[in-house]
Image (cartoon, rainbow, N blue to C red):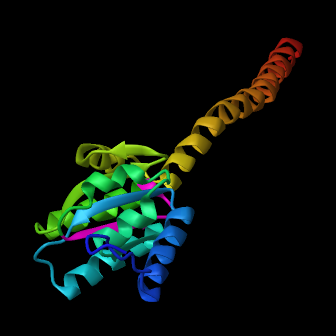
């Protein structure tokens, strides 16, 4: 072996475990948002995690080099360019719009939290795209609107069907009264 040859070392088991953990989180995620957390305290990071929990999302801080290894050759490879500086990854397993809303609200109250972008369905998201996602109604609101749209024609038909017998009864009653007056 020559003196200029580099010796390739096997990665340490704890680093391999972290990369596998990230890969596991990526496999279940619908979307991943990247944010910069420079200047945030541990308590503030905990408040971000608490805000994301109801939308089935998790905010985690990993070393960028390990995150890069995990996203390589996945649908989340677009995140590579965002992994610069102190970054946190938000893995979204549930309602993407609700998670985007929660992270945006956290960024409003914690100016040190900067949304850098993300990936949804294999497509890169800019910070503006994440903001647009946050403006969408939640999944529950969309389902309620859809149910209302389905129900409206049915309710109108039901009112029309109820009106026919009621008007018939009213007309029949008026005819009976008219015949009684004519007989009297």
With 176 as the anchor, is 2 left or right in this view? left
- Residue 142 within the segment the image draws in magenta: no
Q: Residue furthest front?
A: 2
Q: Is residue 111 left or right of residue 29?
A: left
Q: Which quadrant, please, contains the N terminus? A: bottom left
The image position of residue 115, as x and y in percent, is 22, 58
Question: Does residue 167 sit above or below 134 in this rendering?
Answer: above
Q: Tell me the residue at 11%/66% (across/down).
A: 111
The answer to which of 146 and 133 lies nearer the viewer is 133
Q: Nearer the viewer, residue 14 or 127?
A: 14
What span is colored magenta in the figure? 86-96
Task: Indicate the quadrant where residue 40 lies.
Answer: bottom left
Tell me what residue is drawn at x 49 percent, y 77 percent: 21
Q: Camera-side residue: 129 or 27?
A: 27
Which residue: 54% across, 71% down?
24
Quick check: 166 above or below 131? above
**Image coordinates for residue 67, horizontal then vertical, percent:** 37, 68
User: What percent of the width, then of the height, locates residue 164?
Assistant: 78, 24
- Residue drawn at the location 49% of the way across and 46% of the way down: 121
- Counting labels gives 0
Residue 128 lies, with reference to residue 158, above or below; the image says below
- Residue 19 lies, with reference to residue 124, above or below; the image says below
Residue 145 in the image, given as x and y percentages of width and height: 53, 43
Q: Quadrant of residue 89?
A: bottom left
- In the image as oriented, which residue stretches furthest toward the right? 183
Work out which quarter of the rendered image holds the C terminus and state it. Answer: top right
């Amino acid at each position: 072996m020559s003196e200029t040859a580099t010796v390739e070392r096997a990665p340490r088991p704890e680093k391999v475990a972290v990369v596998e953990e990230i890969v596991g989180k990526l496999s279940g995620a619908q979307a991943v948002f990247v944010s910069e957390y420079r200047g945030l305290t541990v308590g503030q990071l905990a408040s971000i995690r608490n805000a994301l929990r109801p939308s089935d999302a998790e905010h985690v801080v990993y070393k960028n080099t390990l995150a890069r290894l995990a996203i390589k050759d996945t649908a989340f490879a677009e995140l590579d360019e965002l992994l610069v500086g102190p970054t946190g990854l938000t893995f979204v397993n549930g309602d993407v719009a609700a998670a985007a809303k929660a992270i945006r609200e956290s960024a409003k109250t914690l100016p040190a939290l900067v949304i850098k972008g993300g990936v949804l369905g294999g497509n890169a998201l800019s910070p503006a795209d994440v903001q647009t996602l946050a403006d969408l109604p939640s999944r529950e609101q969309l389902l309620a609107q859809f149910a209302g749209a389905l129900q409206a024609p049915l309710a109108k038909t039901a009112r029309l069907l109820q009106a026919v017998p009621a008007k018939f009864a009213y007309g029949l009653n008026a005819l009976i009264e008219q015949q009684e007056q004519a007989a009297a």
